[in-house]
Amino acid sequence: MPLFNFLKPKNQLEEGGRSAAPVQQDEGEPVRTCPNCRKEIPISRLQNNRLVCSCGHHFRMRARQRILMITDKNTFSELFAEVQSRDSIGFPGYPEKLETVRAASGEEEAVICGTAMIGKQKCCLFVMEPTFMMGSMGSAVGERITRLFEYALENRLPVIGFTVSGGARMQEGLVSLMQMAKTSAAVRRHSDAGLLYIAVLTDPTTGGVTASFAMEGDITLAEPGATVGFAGARVIEQTTRKQLPKGFQTAEFLLEHGFVDAIADRKEQKKLLTELLKLHNGGVGNE
Amino acid sequence: MSETAYDKVKLARKNDRPTGLDYIRGIFKGFIELHGDRRFGDDPAVVGGLACISGIPVTVIAIEKGHTARERAMRNFGAPNPEGYRKALRLMKQAEKFGRPVVCLIDTSGAFCGIGAEERGQGQAIAENLTEMSALRVPILSILVGEGGSGGALALAAADRVFMLENAVYSVISPEGCASILWKDATKAEEASEHLRLTAQDALSLGIIERIIPEADIGTKVFYDRLRTLIGEEIKALIKTPGLVSQRYARFRGIGSDEAAKLTANEG
């Protein structure tokens, strides 16, 4: 799997992201420009620092790299990879779009699910993929996440989920919209069994994903600076003709308004998740 | 069918269509409105309360667009804020406590896209309705009577049965929004409407809704009488249905899935 696709010049990532295209320096090492501090950072240094700039800006991260970062070595076992999107409403250009995105991203869908150990504790994990149609939720994403929560319920496992999404995938019309209700119902069943779900919101988490499983965790964490919201900022500006407040729809804005529990820096995420899993695992002495 | 999908969109948006309150007054007996979400405020875009249908007390919740310019402004053009969804949820939980069925009448271009709406957690409000409705222990019947705008409509339609009026539309995104993303041109909404499969006929064939309600006589006494009978009978049938919550789970579980629906339906 091409984990480091973003290294490719004139990246094949989805357009419009915060992932600046690499620029060639004289020394020959490719760099990226930080959209926050405007500094040029050699990609090797970014890699060694979990794609976080020295100013603290978190670049978008691909799902498989995140899985490597967050799970214990060689413990991730993928589930439901066979679940594929279908052109259920005959949307023009969608099959071709899927093919192009699959080739460019090296992934089959916008979410990767499986089981893994985090700090020696078993859990179910889903991680969304920003380079796959900006993590949009169609039938395959909805089905994979639903199956993961059902699997976790059956095996009495906690679920940890990293969200990144532009929302419901319009190319699957109402079928996409219904995935919001489907995943939410699965989260609820898992929750009713007394099982833990931690959502980690990453840049960007918007639309139908925010309005479903992203906001349904027992504990909601967010990466610094991540855009999280329901409606797009531009749409809000057009609708209200008002200037948006500074820091609108950032993770910090959500913290201030009471919609996330904590901001989790990437370098502390594994430790934090480990602690949280332990606290829900009888580790506090109820055995 | 002579109308195009976009004709339906325009019909669904027409100002002279009956609004939520018209349906409540036309169909139900003795409506008593209950206000407020007990969290922040009272959203005039969502009307809810108690009423009777076929002698059964129900909780009825409707999105209200208003008719006159003044009413429409007061109702925020039927675009609910988070407190509208939270009021609806409060009334549904109240219905559950007292064993009352819930009827939702939906007509919205979508959840409101505003600064305050985001500050107060529009996404979280919709998400909570979806999880709570999936587990509600009383019957829920939702009817799309005009526009069914994306998550803002679904937040009242995670139901046991979903019906649509013949000229109502139900879509993941507005045709204008779709056109501007796809072709960077909102004026191509007509073309987008065809592709989005947003008519009642589309929704029925995709298995998203159970029934289409003819509306040639929309707004007349006969029309409301017919709806009253239809809703009353459906409510009575749902009350008698065992395993309502697992059937509701299976209803949504099967959408966009091949075989999983059957498996789940057989569980508890």
Image (cartoon, coloured by chain):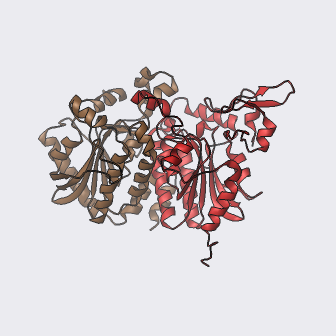
Chain colours: A red, B brown
Question: Residue at horizontal 63%, vertical 55%?
Answer: A125
Which quadrant of the view contains residue B223?
top left
Please indicate, yes or no, whether residue A96 appears anywhere in the rendered image.
yes
Q: In this view, does A127 lie to the left or right of B245?
A: right
Which quadrant of the view contains residue B102?
bottom left
Residue A250, x across and y down, in percent: 55, 40
Residue furthest left in the image: B221
Q: Is residue A172 left or right of residue B230?
A: right
In the image, residue A24 sits, relative to residue B74, either above or below, namely above
Residue B198, x across and y down, in percent: 39, 35
Q: Is residue A249 left or right of residue B3?
A: right
> The C terminus of chain A lies in which quarter of the figure?
bottom right
Q: In this view, does A192 lie to the left or right of A110?
A: left
Question: Residue at horizontal 51%, vertical 35%?
Answer: A171
Please indicate, yes or no, whether residue B257 appears anywhere in the rendered image.
no
> The N terminus of chain A lies in which quarter of the figure?
top right
Question: Residue at horizontal 16%, vertical 57%?
Answer: B54
Question: Residue at horizontal 52%, vertical 43%?
Answer: A253
Residue furthest right in the image: A27
